[in-house]
Amino acid sequence: MADKIFTSPEEFAEEFRSKLRAEAGKDLKDCDNSQRYRALARLIAQKASEQFALSDSENKKSQKKKVYYFSLEFLIGPLLDNYLLNYGVRDIVAEGLQSMGIDLDELIAEEPDPGLGNGGLGRLAACFLDSMAAEGILGFGNGMRYHYGLFKQEIRDGRQVEVTDNWLDKGFPWETKHPESAVLVRFGGEVVRHEKDGKFWFTQEGGELVKAVPYDVPIVGYEGKTINRLRLWSAYPAHEDFDLDAFNAGDYAKASKYRTDVEAISQILYPNDAGEHGRILRLKQEYLFVSAGISSIIRNFKYDHAGADWKTFPDLVAIHTNDTHPAMCGPELMRVLVDQEGLDWDSAWDITTRTVSYTNHTVLPEALEKWPIETFRRLLPRLYMYIEEINRRYMDSFPRDKEGWQDALRNTAILWDGQVRMANLSVICSHSVNGVAALHTQILERETLHDFYELTPEKFNNKTNGISPRRFLGNSNPSLSKLVTGKIGDGWLKDAGELKKLEAYYDDDAFLDALAASKRTNKDRLANYINKTLGIEVDPDSIFDVQVKRFHAYKRQLLNAFKVMHVYNRMLDDPNYKPHKTTFIFSGKAASAYTFAKEVIRLINSIADVINNDERVNDYIKVVFIPNFAVSNAELIYPAADISEQISTAGKEASGTSNMKLMMNGAITLGTLDGANVEIAQLAGMENEKIFGLTEDEVEALKAGGKYFAWDVANADPDGVGRCVHQLTDGTFARLSGNFQQISDELMGNNDYDLVLADFASYVKAWDELTASYDDQRDWQRRALHNIANSGHFSSDRTIREYAHDIWDIDA
């Protein structure tokens, strides 16, 4: 480990007092916990920045390759506790604060969740930054600094209500603004051709000029040896254009319209792009962080490697694009190399395709980004010319010696049917294309990107997702972390593969008892949180059955809701039927325009309202919807879970990461063979999970056969799933906010597209068997331990080592 930033509680206390006076202008006794938190965070951030400055000069001498990870989301979560763990000074800081009458946990609780992401995409990106630093890789995030997060979710009358997430309200003590590194980005205008001395070039002129200003956040690697940074871009006016005449005339909106329009670019994550204005704003976001990021990379390269041949660029720089949001990295790098640096097309193309790589996150064709050509060309005229030329050269070089080449060309072209297809652009500009779970990659190769795979199979590879064991076990589960470290040492924080050593304790009764006690501690903690935030009392001795993730039809929260309805119905029909005491826990957000998903949230809350107030059943079952799912409350939920619900339609979930987090915390997977569930079951053993439902091949066969009819399935099971469908509209669960006709119409009118009804019987049977086995606590503890011991494979450190070796050509 690097030298500790504090060697004793006394040294820390002295530095902390000094920082607090500098930040707050007050003595310790006059400050509240919010001010104390800010001072502590600024102190740690300052230490990290100092280390970064020292190591940066050394890295320049070593000519180490740098990775720039472009992602529209970085769901980094609260950083203080994580960085204290990574620096190895949590105990020193806690003791130093205690000597001043301050509780470290209270300061940690002051930190908001940064509104920089929504779900798995952003959480994965954050874990990757953590792991790159832990592995000593120079890995830098590049994203957007949103003034407001996606939204803060509140539940009113059972409905999701989107409230402004003003996470920057009290500032963000981890960031440092760098106006000196600002980049100018141009939108609109026209492309002008210039010619002189037989040479010609193009410039984009007029339009709207925006200043992208970077804010850097330190990324502290485990043991404090490597400090990287996350660079977040914010949009500012390129010049002052305040209309004083309009202001004096009382037209205040007109007076500041330019500033307002520009700052809107970085106001909110994922603006609604259903209309033209929203599409333009979303496209501006994507281009701004790509253009500013590429300009920053080029500037750093020229400074770090003055006079270097451009051919060395791919040997010293890797640009990785996380999903299609940064798809413009390829053509933007081409534009800069040719227009600004004077390279010829072929040289620039060779550099670009050796530098850029792409991770695909979906097998759903409708989720692959596309932009109307006219919108794109009008907003980004010069970049569009590059995309047009890339597309022309691609089509001209397309092999025409195989039957069906016309279809393959149509499927792989960048420009087609009046659209710019960003996934195709990403593949064509990259030297590597990877999926994020073995099954996902197989489907990409076989279906979603099959024509590309046929043309360039060498580009394709799998990199199964991972999670940070430091964050999702070390920080989130102190009782289990202490237990594990007490038995096998703390090496698992650096190498999660060491969790395998826990296999030696499968038959150790004392250890299994301690494991059960740890789970109970975490369930007590979550139960207290639920009671405090929702006023619902839940029994920690009940099974905690957990499904927490973004709401989407294919993730099938509706299937889980039907199961709960079915258990309730059985209890009312048969007074002798007593399931094992269970608390059904849901959490997650639905996109603001995704009406179906929002209706499922309303259904779950309505079910909770009925069941939790029905004295005939609520001693045995309770339903809880935890609002505003975020990293902070996720760290309470994962350690407390007994059952991990991973029930997406087989073939639809790319990977999932909640399945990994829950596994690492000892939950048993109840799931389909989809995404990374397949690998979880293989590693921990099918006997230690509960798998149900149609496989991906069976799903395809059922749909292809044209013989599946949802009405027939419902009518054939009038006491089971058929009754659940009927109860959507018969008033059973309408007390809180009305019936659910829209869910019924979507489910039955679309012939059960996600096969909720088809998998229902198998799902209920699996749940019955799994919950019945909970009574054998010793066997349950062993199965939980199997999951923990085999979860090390899903460390993001392992994933990053594979990216480094196979894609970025770095020996980590």
Image (cartoon, rainbow, N blue to C red):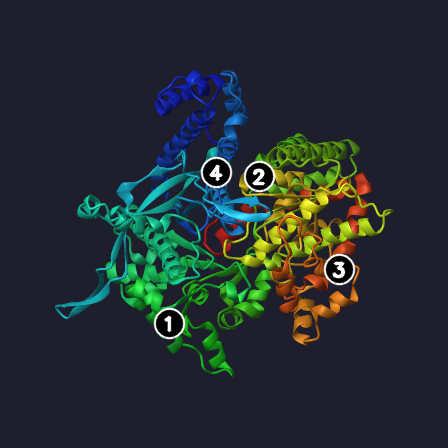
Work out which residue is located at the far left of the displayed protein and give it.
Answer: 197
| Label 4 SS | loop
First in residue order: circle 2 vs circle 1: 1
Give the mark toward the camera: 3 or 2. Answer: 3
**Mark identifier at residue 723:** 3
- The residue under label 2 is 633
| Label 2 SS | helix
Query: Horizontal and vertical percent for residue 655?
Result: 59, 55
Q: Is residue 710 above or below residue 402?
A: above
First in residue order: circle 4 vs circle 3: 4
Figure quadrant of residue 723: bottom right
Q: Disc 3, disc 2: CB below 8 Å?
A: no
Disc 2 residue type (three-letter): Asn
- The residue under label 4 is 221
**Mark identifier at residue 516:** none
Give the mark toward the camera: 1 or 4. Answer: 1
Disc 4 residue type (three-letter): Gly
| Label 3 SS | helix
Query: Horizontal and vertical percent for residue 532?
Result: 61, 33
- The residue under label 1 is 391
Give the mark toward the camera: 3 or 1. Answer: 3
Disc 3 residue type (three-letter): Arg
